Amino acid sequence: MSKRLWAAAAVVVAAVALSASAAGAAGETVGSCIFDELGEAQFEGIEGDGFTAVKELKTQYKAGDKHAKELKEDFEKDLEGCLEAPNPIIPEVTEIIWGGAAFVVLLALMKWKLFPVVKNLMEQRTQRIQDSLDDADRERAEAAEVRARYEAELADAKAEAARLVDEARDQAASVRADLQSRAEADIADMRERAAADVEASKRQAIADLQSEVSDIALGAAEAVLGRSLEDPEMQRQLVDDYIARVGADQG
Amino acid sequence: MAERSTGYADAVAAVARAEGNLDVVSDELFRVARALEGSDELRMTLSDRQIPAARRQQIVEDLLGGRASETTTAVVSMIVAAGRSSDLGGIAREAVEINARDRGRSVAEVRTAVALADGQAERMAAALGAATGHQVDIKVVVDPSIMGGVVATIGDEVIDGSVRHRLSQLRDSF
């Protein structure tokens, strides 16, 4: 971590130093740049310097001098250089040096004082986060375990419920079959008894009817006989018949 | 009870033999027993132990005096005084049997709805004698409940020719 940080800082400083330009490093405005260029202008083959030399070059250029034209074009390029914007990122070299030195000092101070504190805080935070993650993992594991246990218990409960339902269904089927068979037996028994009752009633009715008929017939016979038996001759005849029959049977 | 009746009957027969009138006594005793069977009031009176024995004997003597032999009256009085009036029927039958055996005969109890006409008793005795193979003395009992005909009992054998029996058979046939 520390080595990578130092390497990055060194790369930044080198890039800034290498990309610094002269104009940018001057730190002057476009006007002062043009003014300086005009004041310090010197041209090959033209006498004088500064504004005078620029004025002479203009005269010769207007006169159609080919050499003056080339000088004019080179001078215009130098002036256009004043129009180049200073680098918004790259400071001047001195500033880079001072800034870099301050950066190094600040970096050293930070590494010496701040980084350990920050590192310690980071480590504590990391540790807290790690502890939190560990706690979360442990709680997740515990939750997973609880969930697994709950799911197992739920599965057991479902299995037990299914078993109870099956058992209840079997018992219900058994009870239903038992009740049905018992009801069928009762119905058969009732039918049999009803048939027996009907048969007995029929026999009793026939017997009663026969008894009634016999009573009537016997009553009529007894009435007739009663009147006949009041006749002494009839009684005598019955005794005579008895005597004759006993004598005949045994004789 | 049958054994006791037999004992009384033997005693009665012994007394009658001693008096030389077993035939009469047995017949009169049988008739008295039949009369007793036909009168509930008389039977209950003679069986009532609340009534003094002397009073019951007096009733017997009042009823039989002049109508039966002295031996029969004395025997019946003795049986009633002993409180055995309810056994009088059995004693009479046993006495009749003893009398018949003494003469080499059997006894047939003949029940009829009305009294037998003249000559029917002799013909009945002859017919039953022919049926049993030996001579038979008949004792006639008038029993209107048989309605008509005859029921003869000789020992354990019963020859039922009564109208009541025939009606019963007819009822059973239904």
Image (cartoon, coloured by chain):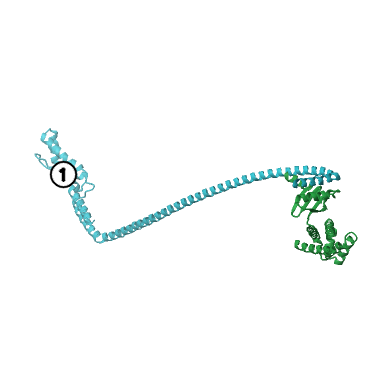
Chain colours: A cyan, B green
Choose top left, top right, bottom left or bottom right for residue A188: top right
Percent across and percent down for residue A200 are: 67, 45
Determine whether, in the image, residue B160 is placed left or right of residue A186: right
Determine whether, in the image, residue A57 is placed left or right of residue A30: left
**Residue A123 visible, this orientation:** yes
Percent across and percent down for residue B122 are: 83, 50
Camera-side residue of B77 and A230: B77
Percent across and percent down for residue A123 are: 29, 59
Q: Chain of mark 1?
A: A
Pointer 1: residues within 10 angstroms few (<14), some, or many (20+)? some
**Residue B52 visible, this orientation:** no
Percent across and percent down for residue A60 are: 12, 35
Determine whether, in the image, residue B173 is placed left or right of residue B147: left
Q: Secondary structure at mark 1?
A: helix
The three-letter amino acid code for the residue at tag 1 is Gly
Residue tagged 1: A39
Q: Residue furthest top?
A: A64
Quadrant location of the N terminus of chain A in the rendered image: bottom left
Choose top left, top right, bottom left or bottom right for residue B99: bottom right
Camera-side residue of B138 and B77: B138
- Residue drawn at point x = 31 percent, y = 58 percent: A126
